[in-house]
Image (cartoon, helix red, strand yellow):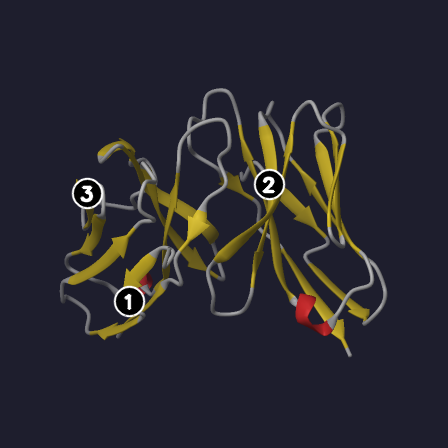
Amino acid sequence: SQQGEEDPQALSIQEGENATMNCSYKTSINNLQWYRQNSGRGLVHLILIRSNEREKHSGRLRVTLDTSKKSSSLLITASRAADTASYFCATDGETSGSRLTFGEGTQLTVNP
Amino acid sequence: DAGVIQSPRHEVTEMGQEVTLRCKPISGHNSLFWYRQTMMRGLELLIYFNNNVPIDDSGMPEDRFSAKMPNASFSTLKIQPSEPRDSAVYFCASTLTGLVYEQYFGPGTRLTVT
């Protein structure tokens, strides 16, 4: 099974609301990243959080990491229709080298 | 920088034909990854290279798939013979191996095998 598992699989909200997506993983990690994918496009890196960090911010994005629960959350505040996309978490560990393991993604729809 | 470049963007071919997908990584990056994405299986890592050397090809589905990286600025993924179940979007990504592992993805090649 995949290292990263996101939930929910799909999320539909209204513009202006906050969106929270969660990711769980199974083995120890060095870093956890979040990526965004617009329909028909490649993935775009959003933010990286290291295993010794608990929270990180970038603009309207807030990522938390709980290594004891092997989970992370991505919060998008004041969502916009343009935030509509799929969001993936990806992890790398001590033995994975350059390799990332991606979750199955959360499809976020922000309705105008 | 132009980012990761993939060609072609779309490929439609008949079963049994050879398909070659191409990728130019970001200049200076030393790791390159080939992924396949489908609705059923999500994003799968097929193979990755460090400094032009294949490191992990355990994701390559079968012998019909092969990948090469003859130099730091070019890689190919070949499927011969192609089958309808190979229809997917194939992404190439690159990164600079080090303390940070964020990957830069190309726009993908949408392959349809009829």
- For this rendering, which residue is in front, B12 or A30? A30
Query: In this image, A102 relative to B81: left or right?
Result: right
Residue at mark 1: chain: B
Q: Decide: few, some or many residues near mark 1? Use Cα within 10 Å; few <14, some 14-19, many ≥20.
A: some
Does dot 3 land on a helix, a strand or a loop?
Answer: strand
- For this rendering, which residue is in front, B9 or A5? B9
The alpha-carbon separation of the residues under discs 3 and 2 comes to 26 Å
Residue at mark 3: chain: B
**In percent of the image, x 54 and y 40: which residue is there?**
A2
Does dot 1 land on a helix, a strand or a loop?
Answer: helix
Does dot 2 land on a helix, a strand or a loop?
Answer: strand
**In percent of the image, x 73 and y 52: which residue is there?**
A59
The alpha-carbon separation of the residues under discs 1 and 3 comes to 26 Å
Q: Mark 3 points at which residue?
A: B69
Image location (x, y in percent) of residue A60 = 76, 55
Q: Which mark is residue A33?
A: 2
* Quadrant in the picture for the N terminus of chain B: bottom left
- Quarter of image, res B18: bottom left
Amino acid carrying label 3: it is Met
For the residues labelled 2 and 1, say whether their Cβ atoms are less than 8 Å apart: no
Amino acid carrying label 2: it is Gln
Image location (x, y in percent) of residue A3 = 56, 36
**Residue farthest to the bottom, as pictured:** A112
Query: In this image, A42 relative to A65: left or right?
Result: left
Tell me whether marks 3 and 2 sit on the same chain. Answer: no
| Foreground label between 1 and 3 | 3
Amino acid carrying label 1: it is Pro
